[in-house]
Image (tube, rainbow, N blue to C red):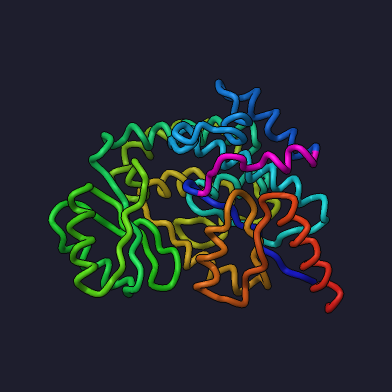
Amino acid sequence: MLRLAFIFPGQGAQYIGMGQELAENIPASAEVFRVADGLLDFPLSSLCFAGPAEKLEQTEYAQPAILATSIAALQAVKSIDIEPVVLAGLSLGEYTALVAAGTLTLEEALPLVRLRGRLMQEAVPRGQGSMSAVMGLDNEVVEDICRNTEGYVAVANYNAIKQVVISGESMAVVRAGAALKESGGKVVPLAVSVPSHCRLMFDAAMRLRSELEKLNWKEPHIPVVSNVNAEKNPAAEQVGLLVQQLYSPVRWEQSVRYMLGEIDYFIEIGPGSSLSGLIKRIDRNAMLGNIEDMKSLEKIKEKVETLCRKG
């Protein structure tokens, strides 16, 4: 039996036109966008399909847009009759995974992630926080430099082997970046307005908790691996984990390694293929592909059929 993990992207994966082809060809995918348009106070489908880019990049709009597009792609996957044994998502993508697992409904998740995005944006005045990707250094080196940098900066994402993201006060991120370059690392500032997954998001996390506690959390019918502890967790733990997720580092590399013990391949579902690239850095043999449009859907279908025939 082919053991698959479905994984879902986070913020940054958005692009104009995402989900449009699936909605035009697959009724179940179109229905996701119809529901989203009815739930929110803006036309989400139009934003996904036509932009404008400036609005699609804003955190409070990007998050529900990516979630809806990913669920629309998941609905398309049902047409090729494959099932995962485990789910996970990067940051925002974890909410998509929880919808896919039946722990949250789409109707609960869309307003929730829009609120999450707005709270994150409001937590730190624009320009006072930033993030940078760091490549080529061991985690311990990056952590040590962050600890010894003036101001606040910390590791926000453990993405892959020698590939992390740092987050914090803008000047501290710049200072840490300079020290990391001196140590032989490659540092790339990220085009984000929110310093995610660090203690600057603590107040936003506390405000989000009250909304999370109002929801009717159901036990997942497919286990979801958390960004916080890189393990499967019951429904009763989800509120605490999602609160903590906002101000704690995303342990993506650790989550992938955990899933590698149980699965044969990963399929990335939703806009882009950023997670596929990270997984290839962790284990080149584990990746199967991504699904974001009709071409990629057909490609996965052919790959799965070939693998099943080989048995």
State the residue lying farthest toward the right.
Answer: 309
User: In the rendered view, does 118 fall on the left or right side of 109?
Assistant: left
Span colored in magenta? 13-26
User: In the rendered view, does 206 fall on the left or right side of 116?
Assistant: left
Identify the residue at horizontal 46%, vertical 33% (top origin).
60
Q: Position of residue 106 (x, y in %)?
A: 65, 36
Identify the residue at horizontal 62%, vertical 38% (top origin).
68
Q: As rendered, which of 251 and 219 lies closer to the eye?
A: 251
Identify the residue at horizontal 64%, vertical 26% (top origin).
37
Identify the residue at horizontal 44%, vertical 34% (top origin).
54
Q: Position of residue 209 (x, y in %)?
A: 43, 36
Residue 140 lies, with reference to residue 188, above or below; the image says below
Q: Is residue 17 magenta?
A: yes
User: In the rendered view, does 79 fall on the left or right side of 177?
Assistant: right
Residue 295 lies, with reference to residue 137, above or below; the image says above
Residue 135 in view: yes
Q: Dividing the picture into quarters, in which one does residue 309 lie?
A: bottom right
State the residue lying farthest toward the left.
Answer: 150
State the residue lying farthest toward the top.
Answer: 41
Q: Position of residue 31 (x, y in %)?
A: 74, 33
Q: Position of residue 239 (x, y in %)?
A: 49, 43
Q: As rendered, which of 9 and 18 lies closer to the eye?
A: 18
Residue 212 in view: no
Count of number-bearing discs: 0
Quarter of the figure with the N terminus = bottom right
Quarter of the figure with the C terminus = bottom right
User: In the rendered view, does 142 fall on the left or right side of 120?
Assistant: left
Q: Is residue 97 magenta?
A: no
